[in-house]
Amino acid sequence: MANSRQDIENWIAKTAMGDRAAFNQLYDATCAKLLGVSLRILKDRAAAEDAMQDSYVKIWKNADRYSANGLSPMTWLITIARNTSIDRLRAGKNMTELGDVYDRIPCDARGPEELAVARSEAERIISCMGELEPKRRDAIEGAYFGGKSYADLADQFEIPLNTMRTWLRRGLQSLRDCMAR
């Protein structure tokens, strides 16, 4: 059974109060996704697992900083994992080939139904990414999956930094709109 946004927000709130059981539930519900984010950036399973562990330490220590303000709690968690992974990537740690992404992720306890739903969601995201203008799609992929900074992307596309920020913000909004259809 998939966990709701409210479940995740509750676990974060309880984690902020030092509730280890809630933290364990949060971990079980989100670790596969955060590991996937780290794998996509670091391209090495061991490095991604280390980054994910660091991410959960940050989540434990900073859970009190999350506030349910209309933004998805998964966005907050993914941002922590993404930034931790990018920090590792920039530090030059463990940059090797990806390996077999389809190996069973140890913390993933989802059943066949949930895997099918996740696969369907992934297909929807890929389809929505395909609707974006190619340069903007490439910029989003570079920022959120390639570990590139906004400044690096602005240089790559030879546009001002603020224009890159606008591209990314509008591109993400287009993705949200597409996913809501």
Image: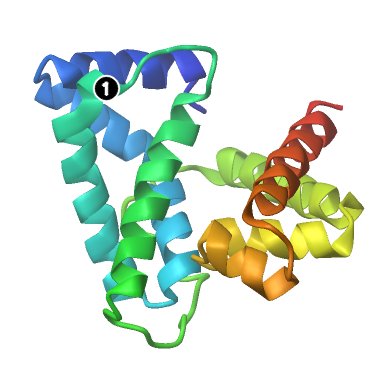
Front position in the image: 50 or 111: 50
In the image as oriented, which residue stretches furthest toward the bottom? Answer: 96
Residue 134, given in percent of the width and then of the height, sits at: 86, 64
User: Residue 117 falls in which quadrant of the image?
Assistant: top right
Residue 74, given in percent of the width and then of the height, sits at: 47, 32
In the image as oriented, which residue stretches furthest toward the front? Answer: 160
Front position in the image: 5 or 117: 5
Position of 50 with respect to 123 (left or right) is: left
Question: Residue shown at 75%/34% (left/top)?
Answer: 173
Question: Residue shown at 23%/43% (left/top)?
Answer: 56
Position of 133 with respect to 155 (left or right) is: right
Number of callouts: 1
Q: Is residue 145 visible?
A: no
Q: Is residue 83 visible?
A: yes
- At label 1, counting other C-alpha atoms closer than 10 Å, the crowd grade (few under 14, some 14-19, many 20 or more) is few
Residue 122, given in percent of the width and then of the height, sits at: 69, 50
Position of 10 with respect to 20 (left or right) is: right
Kindly identify the amino acid type of the residue bearing the numbered disc 1. Answer: Arg
Up the image or down, 72 lies above or below 104; here it is: above
Q: Which residue is mark 1?
A: 65
Q: Quadrant of the C terminus?
A: top right
Residue 159, given in percent of the width and then of the height, sits at: 74, 63
Position of 33 with respect to 23 (left or right) is: right
Up the image or down, 162 lies above or below 43; here it is: above
Question: Residue shown at 49%/19% (left/top)?
Answer: 5
Badge 1 marks a residue whose secondary structure is helix
Question: Residue shown at 22%/64% (left/top)?
Answer: 50
